[in-house]
Amino acid sequence: ETGVTQTPRHLVMGMTNKKSLKCEQHLGHNAMYWYKQSAKKPLELMFVYSLEERVENNSVPSRFSPECPNSSHLFLHLHTLQPEDSALYLCASSQDRDSSGNTIYFGEGSWLTVV
Amino acid sequence: AQSVTQLDSQVPVFEEAPVELRCNYSSSVSVYLFWYVQYPNQGLQLLLKYLSGSTLVKGINGFEAEFNKSQTSFHLRKPSVHISDTAEYFCAVGNTGFQKLVFGTGTRLLVSP
């Protein structure tokens, strides 16, 4: 139990569907992240939120839409995805967005398969 | 820009043998270095991190890593591995300022009896 909970753990969706991934952190952290993990590739940082404000968007396609309603919750809304978007999506949090060696705590991930 | 290289995609080893997982980084500024472990069907968990001070860092589960600035390396070691150490290990580098860790591609450690 890392203090970061993701749901659902597994999701299969068609290319025309709309779905959402949910993340909740119980650590009192101010920063939250979405990462994409694909086979044989480094973890890709997708979005960063600090105090509910988006501070980074790493050239992610608009078919991925994040939402951070408060500092404990983070969503990733998905629509008209492509098969190459199939991957493990990891949510994470840290005390602050500024790096002073703050540990990033990861959730267990949501396995997404696009068919 | 920072980068991390984990040259070994997979390291097979027998139980109770020592192991070293290699990590090299490049950065133009002072760095913080991390090792994370990912067990099957789980997220990443911090093993250890180097921020400053002693170059030998001890982490959980008997792992340790040594920061070598001249060789820009941060290799992970364990003197005697267990079957339960089978997992994917990720090296990551960060620096001061914005929290943006750069991860390596990972090394799969396979421990067999």
Image (spheres, coloured by chain):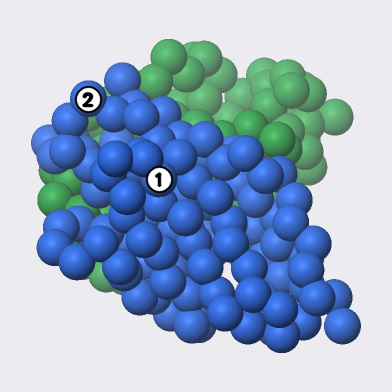
Q: In this view, does B47 lie to the left or right of A42?
A: left
Q: Position of residue A45 (x, y in %)?
A: 43, 33
Which of the image's four quarters has the C terminus of chain A?
top right
Q: Where is residue A41 in the image (x, y as percent from the top left)?
A: 63, 32
Tag 1: residue type? Answer: Ser
Pair 1/2: label in front: 1
Q: Nearer the viewer, residue A28 or A36?
A: A36
Residue B28, numbered label: 2
Within 10 Å of the Cα at label 1, are there few (<14), some (14-19), or many (20+) other Cα atoms?
some
The residue lying furthest to the front in this view is B70
Q: Nearer the viewer, residue A20 or B105?
A: B105
Q: According to the image, label 1 marks what residue?
A: B73
Within 10 Å of the Cα at label 2, are there few (<14), some (14-19), or many (20+) other Cα atoms?
few
Task: Report helix, strand or loop for mark 1.
Answer: strand
State which chain is coloured green. Answer: A
Q: Nearer the viewer, residue B27 or A33?
A: B27
Q: Where is residue B103 in the image (x, y as percent from the top left)?
A: 46, 40
Q: In this view, does A31 lie to the left or right of A76?
A: left
Task: Report helix, strand or loop for mark 2.
Answer: loop
State which chain is coloured blue. Answer: B
Q: Tell me the residue at 19%/66% (across/down).
A: B54
Q: Tell me the residue at 30%/68% (across/down).
A: B56
Q: Which of marks 1 and 2 is nearer the N terminus?
A: 2
Quarter of the view holding residue B110 = bottom right
Q: Which chain carries label 2?
A: B
Tag 2: residue type? Answer: Ser
Q: Is residue B67 above or below residue A18?
A: below
Q: Where is residue A99 in the image (x, y as percent from the top left)?
A: 18, 45
Let me know if marks 1 and 2 both belong to one chain: yes
